[in-house]
Image (tube, rainbow, N blue to C red):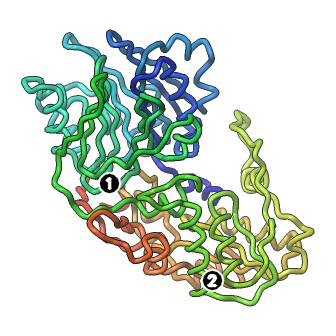
Amino acid sequence: MLGEIKGLNEECGIFGVWGHQDSAQLTYYGLHALQHRGQEGAGIVTTDGEQLKLAKGHGLINEVFSENQLDDLSGHASIGHVRYATAGDGGYENIQPLLFRSQTGGLALAHNGNLVNAQALKNQLEAQGSILQTTSDTEVVAHLIKRARHLPLEQAIMEALSMIKGAYAFLVMTEDRMFVANDPRGLRPLSLGHLGESWIVSSETCAFDVVGAEYDREIDPGELLIISDEGVESKRFSAPIQRTLCSMEYVYFSRPDSNLDGKNVHASRKRMGKSLAEEAPIDADVVTGVPDSSISAAIGYAEASGIPYELGLIKNRYVGRTFIQPSQELREQGVKMKLSAVRGIVEGKRVVMVDDSIVRGTTSRRIVKMLKEAGAKEVHVRIASPPIKNPCYYGIDTSNSGELIAANNSIEEIEEQIGADSLAFLSVQGLNDSIYQGEESLRHGGCMACFTGNYPTEIYPNTMHPYEKA
């Protein structure tokens, strides 16, 4: 899916290196592999054992960092972050990693996720005299750690983690140690690998392949790793709970060459497409997927249905950011800058258009219209996930159900609004079976709150969008 104007956007990706002389360069390449997780800003902090150095800025990785900047980031360890602003705003001060300096040393933090009790903790901290410099959830954790300064740092971090609720994968680095933590339910992906004698941490396993590292394992929910020159030590700050990895990681966010919970994303998406074909068959001539995240599901749909898969939609890979503000008329046509229908493939055909999800419906309507303008006789829309009816409070920018088309319309009404000849979604059971294949257990399981409304954590009132509280 290309994104529904403000389409589905995940908060960020994190990457860390310990024990490599070119740690900043490795982190640069690792973040480049995670660029799909955030395009608004990026940052890297390094340590040489005595000092923490930071470079960050707005934009894509190659816009933020020059070769000279990377050379200046000397050190044997580093943490990095790519950001999509969902919690807080997009100001420079909110670009991560956040770096704090004090008389007792420096502390850098990078975070993927969203804390549902962040506002309550901010109110508490400010009442106790803390002064917050950003609007980011991440700063709350730094203050909680520093507030426990009477404890050894490792224990202070564990105490801070025990106070926060929601989704989080954290990298915390000082001059001489790196701390890696995953929330008690493992809502966000986080994995450990190695490159020679160096340790690598990444939101997605695809980044290991890019830097030549070998995958070791996932960071367990509720686990804290302490990485130093002495090696890796594992501790628990939370008892094991049923894991609820975000299902949208499989549906949309993660790269198809990543593995999550031991399952390849591409293979999972193909199974979603096959299940969708079984649940919602249709007579048609060609199947096409909306690039890029829907291609795998479209291939699965084609294989299961026997309808040939074709490249009916082509993505323009050279569309960048622009400072030109188009007129409303041109803005309405903006999707054509990103996507084109292949007339020679779809003209006169009954087309099955497979997409991963529908959020607000705007882009789906435009793509259906585009296919019909290219001569498609019929356009049957098949969505490889259930209808998104509920807000997400864990780091995806859908905290307002007023913007979710499926929260306010029936499938028949959505079908009419997007101009499709037919519309069908994958069932919740179909999605669950496609991902886990009957292997759900204490370790394996997914969060499907955006589809079902069953949230795995408590949701605090001040977490919600104003619309939700009305």
Taking the spot 33% from the left edge, 25% from the top edge, the residue there is 108
Q: Residue at x 31, y 39 (%)?
A: 137
> Disc count in the image?
2
Out of 440 and 145, give the one closest to the viewer.
440
Q: Looking at the image, is mark 1 or mark 2 earlier in the sequence?
A: 1
Locate residue 208, reporting x and y percent.
52, 40
User: How far, Cα to Cα, is label 1 from label 2?
Assistant: 31 Å
Pick the quarter of the image with the N terminus.
bottom right
At label 1, the amino acid type is Gly
Residue 470 in view of the camera: no
Q: Mark 2 sits on what residue?
A: 277
Q: For numbered disc 1, what is the local secondary structure?
A: loop
Q: Position of residue 19 (x, y in %)?
A: 40, 23
Q: Which image quadrant for residue 235? A: top left
Contact between marks 1 and 2 (CB within 8 A): the answer is: no
Residue occupied by mark 1: 186
Q: Amino acid at mark 2?
A: Ala
Q: Residue at x 56, y 36 (%)?
A: 212
Q: Which mark is residue 5?
A: none
Q: Is the C terminus in the top left, top right, bottom left or bottom right quadrant?
A: bottom left
Is residue 310 left or right of 231 when viewed as pictured? Answer: right
Quick one: SS at disc 2?
A: helix
Question: In the rendered image, is residue 335 in sight?
Answer: yes
x, y percent for residue 203? 44, 44
